[in-house]
Amino acid sequence: MTSTPEYLVIGHVTFDLTPDGISLGGPGFYSSLTLSKMGRRVALLTSGITSEFNMHLDQLEVVNVPSQATTTFENWNSDGTRLQKIHSVASEITKLDVPHTWRDIPTVLLSPVANEIRPEIMDLFYNSSLAISPQGWMRKWKNDGIIQQSKWGTRISFLDNTQVVVFSNMDIPKYETGYSDNFNCSVLIITLGSEGAYLRWENNWFHIPPYPTIEVDPTGCGDVFMAAYLIRYNETNDPLQAALFASCAGSLCAEGSGHISIPNRADVINRMNQFPNMAVEPVDLLN
């Protein structure tokens, strides 16, 4: 890649252990590939990638922090509940790992998956628009590796200058009320899987409808949503229209398995044209 990147994605690319073998995953992986597939110039700062998978990232400008391990997850269902186990974690990503030439990239997406990103890394990007998928800061595990939700009891002040924060309702600790109050960002989006998403903007809440789809595999759909949202938001500066575009992109991702189902821009536009009456609706989540 010779041109200056438009987007910088930071976060571990992971190994996912599945019944069919090992696949690549992680929000950084899905988000960066989505941005690239939709025609954007992308840089990826990660750790733990092995050389045999570099072909999946050949359209990106990649810096891989040296590591003795790759972050590896195992997922399974138990009585309808999704369980996740972490087997290994790659190297931490710090401020020193960010190339100086990347510190003025227009849009920076932090996508931690296993607490691998130090929050102070945000201090480097005062000329950039910041977006965060904080899933990896919202989980914890003990020696057995079983992932648990991590409670954030107070407002997360380091997110105050963030343009967009997106996470799943599955990341919210059970019975935690007022959880969204912890996030004082410009746009907050809570994805709801097949039910769409909630979006908070200027202290108002909106429901983002899901596009009709035949779900095959939901893996990575939230990360595709995030990347597609950033693209359209940067183009239009309209958080609601951007959310419709993102919802459509996520629905297309769900129709296949793994990263091969990531849609391109034409796919999204064609699907949106098939459903021209999809609309964002205001909702009251305060009562």
Image (tube, rainbow, N blue to C red):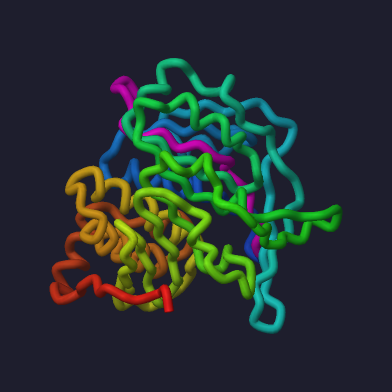
The stretch of residues the image draws in magenta is 1-18
Task: Determine whether, in the image, residue 36 is placed left or right of residue 179.
Answer: left
Q: Position of residue 116 (x, y in %)?
A: 64, 39
Task: Determine whether, in the image, residue 71 is placed left or right of residue 39.
Answer: right
Q: Position of residue 58 (x, y in %)?
A: 42, 33
Q: Nearer the viewer, residue 124 or 228?
A: 124
Query: Looking at the rendering, which quadrant does residue 84 occupy?
Result: bottom right
Task: Determine whether, in the image, residue 14 is placed left or right of residue 277.
Answer: right
Q: Position of residue 182 (x, y in %)?
A: 52, 55
Q: Is residue 59 visible?
A: no
Task: Determine whether, in the image, residue 44 is placed left or right of residue 51.
Answer: left
Q: Is residue 219 visible?
A: yes
The N terminus is located in which quarter? top left
The C terminus is located in which quarter? bottom left
Q: Residue at x 29, y 60 (%)?
A: 243
Q: Is residue 4 magenta?
A: yes
In the displayed structure, would residue 28 be above or below residue 80? above
Q: Residue at x 67, y 44 (%)?
A: 71
Q: Nearer the viewer, residue 123 or 166?
A: 123
In the displayed structure, would residue 192 be above or below residue 249? below
In the displayed structure, would residue 232 be above or below residue 96? below
**Residue lying at the far bottom of the rendered structure:** 79
Number of dots carrying numbers? 0
Q: Residue at x 56, y 71 (%)?
A: 177
Q: Residue at x 39, y 53 (%)?
A: 226
Q: Position of residue 111 (x, y in %)?
A: 51, 45
**Residue lying at the far right of the rendered structure:** 143
Q: Is residue 3 magenta?
A: yes
